[in-house]
Amino acid sequence: MEVKIGVQNAARELTIDVEESPEDVEKLVADAVSGEGVLNLKDVKGRRIIVPVAKLAYVELGHGTAGQVGFRS
């Protein structure tokens, strides 16, 4: 599943693919925000993304576009 994270004062968003369900990611975000800590996600390649919730602008959950190559019209 694709997760887009907006960070305050950053021109670009972070886009990562995770193996968790949308419900699991939503719970991780809610727990991080309520605890005023950090949002900690692991992508499908094993990398960790850590964002302080004080700098979190938004989190968008989507399905992703696996396997797309080439031009689209």
Image: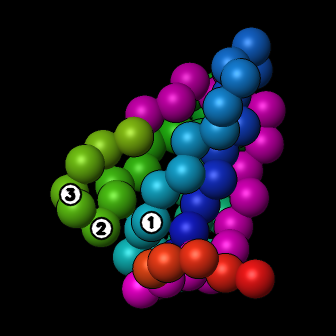
Q: CA distance from mark 3 to mark 1?
A: 10 Å
User: Percent x, y for residue 8?
Assistant: 75, 20
Q: Nearer the viewer, residue 3 or 50?
A: 3
Q: Nearer the viewer, residue 7 or 53?
A: 7
The residue that label 3 is drawn on is 46
Residue, x 72% and y 50% (percent of image)?
59
Look at the numbered disc 3 and give the secondary structure of its residue: loop
The residue that label 1 is drawn on is 17
Q: Nearer the viewer, residue 16 or 30?
A: 16
Look at the numbered disc 1 and give the secondary structure of its residue: strand
Q: CA distance from mark 2 to mark 3?
A: 6 Å
Label 3: how many Cα within 10 Å (few below 14, some 14–19, many 20+): few
- Based on the picture, tell me whether residue 60 belongs to the magenta stretch: yes
Task: Examine the rendered structure and indicate whether residue 54 appears above or below residue 17.
Answer: above
Q: Earlier in the sequence, mark 1 or mark 2?
A: 1
Tags 2 and 3 in contact by the CB under 8 Å rule? yes
Q: Is residue 40 left or right of residue 61?
A: left
- Describe the colour scheme in one phrase: rainbow
Tags 1 and 2 in contact by the CB under 8 Å rule? yes
Look at the numbered disc 2 and give the secondary structure of its residue: loop
Residue, x 39% and y 40% (percent of image)?
49
User: Percent x, y for residue 55?
Assistant: 68, 20
Q: Is residue 9 visible?
A: yes
Range of residues picked out in magenta: 50-68
Q: Is residue 54 visible?
A: no
Residue, x 68% and y 74% (percent of image)?
62
The residue that label 2 is drawn on is 44
Q: Is residue 54 left or right of residue 45?
A: right
Quarter of the image containing the C terminus?
Answer: bottom right
Q: Earlier in the sequence, mark 3 or mark 1?
A: 1
